[in-house]
Amino acid sequence: MNPDGTPKEVELEMDLTCMIAQVFAFFAAGFETTSSATSCLLHELAYNQEIQKNIQKEIDEVLMKYDNRLCYEAVAEMTLLNLALKESLRMYPPLKILTRVCANQYKISQLDVTIDSGVSIIIPLHALQNDGKHFDKPEQFRPERFANNQNIKSSYVYMPFGMGPRNCIGYRLGQMQSLAGVAALLQNFSVEPSEKTRRKLKLDLGLNKKTVKDGVPLKLLSRIKLP
């Protein structure tokens, strides 16, 4: 960063170690978060059967237009599924906190607090996205709150994959994988709570990455009617 706040151009040689690190970041950001996001979404749909049925109806109608092919264009048209994933990511963000470093001195006038350059900042992401000050009835699974962002009071309290030029590099990959995976599953199955399912997921608070203790057990019921 230049003294005037403009970005400073640097040259970086992509050696083998750097390339391996970038590949690892893609896999960690794009695949690890996918399984987590998919599991939490299915958990909420298991307890919200009406929402699940509406999403399945949408999936059936969209796939019919594409000769039953689960392609990128088909997934992009599944609006209800997309809203449900956003709501699930609000309730269960892949990371509980975000860490940043202040690039330039900044004063928060409302608090009369000045943050100096170089100071590390911790953003309590999970707490922000589940705070009643920012989301009405945050404990409820309500995908409709993301329709036109009508019930989101600030754009900087919903950041499951970060915000700005340093947001998660695997965000779009992980999002598309989650949508496609859930669509493929709900096309053929319905999900319900099993005898081992807990309504409230028990999150491991000791790690930054969101992990669920004892997993997310669910019951799958086939939608395919055998002859």
Image (cartoon, rainbow, N blue to C red):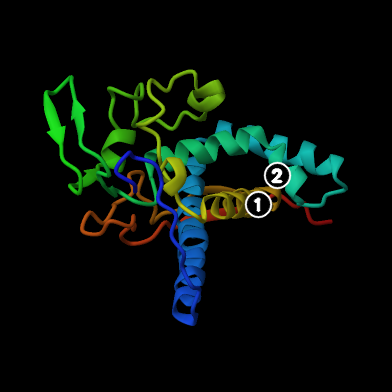
Q: Mark 1 is on which residue type?
A: Ala
**Side of 4 where 63 appears, left or right:** right
Type of amino acid under label 2: Val
Residue 135 on image: x %, y %: 35, 24
Residue at point 28%, 56% (across, down)? 208
**Front position in the image: 135 or 53:** 135
Residue at image mark 2: 75
Q: Residue at x 49, y 79 (%)?
A: 15
- Residue shown at 33% from the left, 57% from the top: 209
Q: Does the image show residue 45?
A: yes
In this image, 57 relative to 206: left or right? Answer: right
Dots 1 and 2: beta carbons under 8 Å?
Answer: yes
Residue placed furthest toward the bottom: 16
| Disc 1 element | helix
Residue that label 1 marks: 180
Residue 134 percent location from the top left of the image: 32, 24
Q: Which mark is residue 211?
A: none
Q: How many marks?
A: 2
- For the residue pair 185 and 173, the one nearer the viewer reads as 173
For marks 1 and 2 on the same chain, the one whose residue lies earlier in the sequence: 2
**Which type of secondary structure does the marked residue at label 2 adopt?**
helix
Residue 222 position, x and y percent, is 67, 53
Gap in angstroms between the C-alphas marked 1 and 2: 6 Å
Question: Residue 194: percent from the left, percent from the top?
Answer: 45, 53
